[in-house]
Image: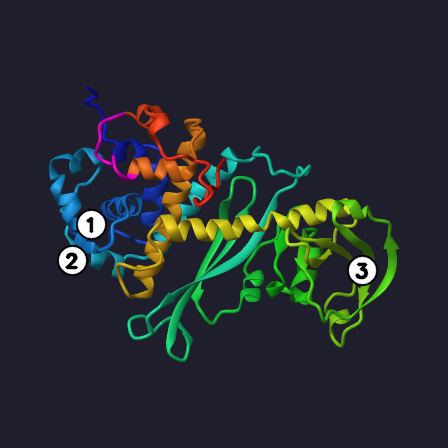
Amino acid sequence: MNIGSTVLAQLMDFIPRHEFRSCVKRYRGHHKMKSFSCWDQFLCMAFAQLTFRESLRDIEACLRSMSSRLYHCGFRGRVSRSTLAEANERRDWRIYSDFAQVLITRARALYRDEDLGVELDKTVYALDSTTIDLCLSLFPWAPFQQQKAAVKLHTLLDLRGSIPTFIRVTDGRVHDVRILDEIIPEPGSFYVLDRGYISFRRLHRLHRSQAFFIIRARRDLKFRRVYSHAVDRSKGLRYDQTIVLTGVATPLHYPEMLRRVGVFDQEHQHISLLTNHFGLPASTVGELYKHRWKVELFFRWIKQHLHIKSFFGTSENAVKTQIWIAVAVYVLIAIIKKELKFERSLYTILQVISVNPFSQTTLNELLTQNENTVQNEEDPNQLILFE
């Protein structure tokens, strides 16, 4: 029988504690703190994400039932729902935002050589947002519609490994296109966008930064064709054109030439794409846009398998704290999968950990034993990000 660390403690060993302490110090997270530290708060909230807890009372009951093992998992403060609620309300959510970025940087380095499925050695990002509906009377700081509140999770996803590199949490009224103003373009990288992000002034900013974009065009786009290139229709291509914009204001906002590529999607519907890269094969432009579905898959995955559709607190600080810790847990599991070279999907790893947080089995043994009895990972009803 293994008498070593618990599974939860082994997971936390992958966290750079000095980086966490730096984030806490940066925002004075321990100012006027008595006993319940930021690390205790992070452990409680991470435990809630890993084991699918539903409320603060649920977290308190489960952790107190294992009180004899909490010290060895890293807990130093007494766990109570009132103390955790107060910490979520008052401690700066940016502590956990900055710390999640530390984990994201580490994960991106691990997944740098991940196969993208397209012959391209550049970084490819997909930008999109998802809306989480809330009750207006409980969350008045997040208005969305007249009788409704919501928060938006704007995410820039690195398609190599499906790692979120930029996340902004806003109220539901913030338009998606405004997030382009907050992104610092990386020269040479590709940004794959849906047509909700069409703003030619902002797209020209990407172009001037020597970054490339692929975006779905609107049907009412006003343009003039300059040249048509030959295409292979057997690859699902319709046209490959060089165009200039001819709308009322668009030529002023984007005075350069653009490339317009027509492709068929999986439902054989015509999609018109715009890009400022003229060297890629037209088929590769279409393939890169098809990979945009990974950001949709990311949103569906975290909504189904992490606790972000309902919240343990009602303040803006509590909501953002919970979301950022959920992101940190997601990235942490991705790091563990890569560093320990597990073949199982992220979903399966999370499910196994969720029922064994206080087991004293090693992670390697826990996640490799009884493989034949674990749920089939090819189940089409499950969302699998890491294959």
Q: Is residue 172 visible?
A: yes
Q: Position of residue 322 (x, y in %)?
A: 32, 55
Question: Magenta residues: mostly which secondary structure?
Answer: loop
Residue count near mark 3 (Cα–Cα under 10 Å), binned few <14, some 14–19, many ≥20: some
Relative to residue 149, is residue 161 drawn left or right? Answer: right
Given residues 289 and 40, the one toward you in this image is 289
| Magenta highlight on residue 340 | no
* Residue at the image position 11 percent from the left and 35 percent from the top: 68
Task: Tell me the kind of residue under disc 3.
Answer: Met
Q: Is residue 26 visible?
A: no
* Residue at the image position 13 percent from the left and 46 percent from the top: 78
Res 269 label: none
Q: Which residue is identified by label 1?
A: 59
Res 257 label: 3
Specify the color scheme.
rainbow
Residue count near mark 1 (Cα–Cα under 10 Å), binned few <14, some 14–19, many ≥20: many
Which residue occupies the extreme bottom position in the image? Answer: 146
Task: Tell me the kind of residue under disc 1.
Answer: Ile
Query: Which element type, helix, strand or loop, lies under badge 1?
Result: helix
Rounded to the nearest whole Å, what is the CA distance between mark 1 and mark 3? Answer: 57 Å
Q: Which residue is identified by label 2?
A: 82
Given residues 140 and 61, the one toward you in this image is 61
Q: What is the span of residues highlighted in magenta in the rendered image?
A: 354-361
